[in-house]
Image (tube, helix red, strand yellow):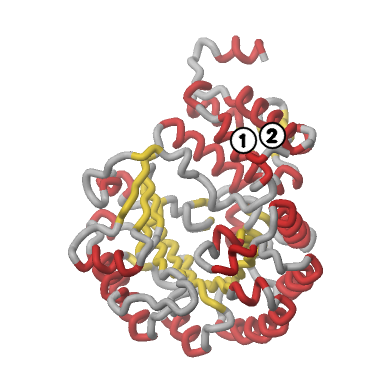
Amino acid sequence: MSAAFESHATRAASGSYPSPALLNQSPWPTPRAADSDRSLNIAPLAICINIPLQARGAELPPALAGALGREIASQPHNLRQRPVSQLMWRNPFNDFGLGDLTATMHQLGSHFRLLPGDSHEYCAEVDIFQTTEEQVALLKGLGFNQLLVTLPPAALSSKLDDVAPVLTQRIRALRDYGFASIGIKLVYGFHAQKPHQLRHLIDTIIHLQFERVYLCDALEDYHWDPLATACANSSELQDHFTLLFNALRNNGYRVLGNDCFVLPKDQLAVAQRHYRLRRTLLNYNASNAADLLGLGPGAYGQLGRTYQRNEPDPQTYCHKVGNGESPVIGSYSLDEQGQLLRLVIDQLLCYHRLDITYMESRYKLHLMPLLRQSIRRLASELSSGSHALVQFKDRACMHLPPIGILHLRAICDALVMEGLLDQHKTTSTDTSERYTKQ
């Protein structure tokens, strides 16, 4: 297997597209240039508030809560009009007190259309070892109806045998709060993780019936932590991922992308079955949110075809916002090719199928040569037959069998590398001729 595919042939795919290589750098004339698209104003909006985890011993600046409130207040009116159908708050208790969290949520509610009842997906990502019952009760009272629990790097890398009993005790306590969904982020790829330990942990997760299980690469998710430097080699990474993937699929979980697993009763599974699943840089959702506003240090946003990233350093972020400056340090706009490729990849990630006839008719594309060439080249890289990775049905549709879903990141990478969809544009007069030549 070549080095190009060795590092990600069987790794998590859902958060990897569009990649920086696909996005075109472009200057931003204003801090929120993408918001001038008035056609997006009534569409549901996803918001992610990011409170970054810090290396051991480091503290977040005291001014962070105030800076976050100022960034919220600075958003333009046309964004505030949109109903917030999905909200993710990452690490809300990382150096944030209960008063800071409450004040920030009130600030958010005073500037955005937060939704009542169960018509939304509001999730908090918390460390299961550190979060108290008082904090959980506050989250529930503030309107969060979902939890995503994480495990600290130390537990995942060197104390995996101790995780299962603590996890069992705490999750049973969390069930009493009536969250609609409790998910877990399972970070794999630490060198110290042994296959038998991962099997024991995933058996515990399956037994506890987490509604959602997210598989995440240690180096990508904990790049700031020294423990992440002790990651497994590429062969071990693939073995870890394959073990977890097969265990979850074989125990009744539906898979979104190749790294998000949901119980059949979960609303994401229902949305997938009814072909109304959506994806942003944040996550999948069942609430029709296609755009994402990122708030806080290091947050990513996606508005229309424009992607942006906030200043990741908390001190610099606070300084910029305190001086009335935008915290955005980089933005990228998809060109026509990038937007079409995103549509194709979104279909594969959400549904593991691609309606070739519809895509070619709707967007005047000639996809079959691109797909066949990409899959054939990938199959040779993986020493696997192309017929095993994908299945074509009468030229009209491409389906991914389990082996194709497992290698979904590599399939998407192959499409990006082969890419250049604008070179596969058709006209109404040459489509039949090109099909005849295939």
In front of the other: 150 or 88: 150
Whether tag 1 and tag 2 are in contact, CB under 8 A, the answer is yes
The percent position of residue 429, horizontal first and vertical second, equals: 51, 10
In front of the other: 408 or 8: 8
Q: Which residue is mark 2?
A: 378
The percent position of residue 434, horizontal first and vertical second, equals: 60, 13
Q: Return the mark for residue 414.
A: 1
Q: Is residue 36 left or right of 288 when viewed as pictured?
A: left
The percent position of residue 378, horizontal first and vertical second, equals: 69, 34
The percent position of residue 110, horizontal first and vertical second, equals: 27, 71
Visible residue check, residue 123? yes
Which corner quadrant of the image does residue 217 belong to? Answer: bottom right
Position of residue 94 relative to residue 309, above or below, is below
Is disc 1 surrounded by few (<14), some (14 to 19) or many (20+) residues within 10 Å?
many
In front of the other: 55 or 435: 55
Residue in view at x 62 percent, y 50 percent: 257
Residue in view at x 55 percent, y 71 percent: 148
Q: Is residue 254 left or right of 103 when viewed as pictured?
A: right
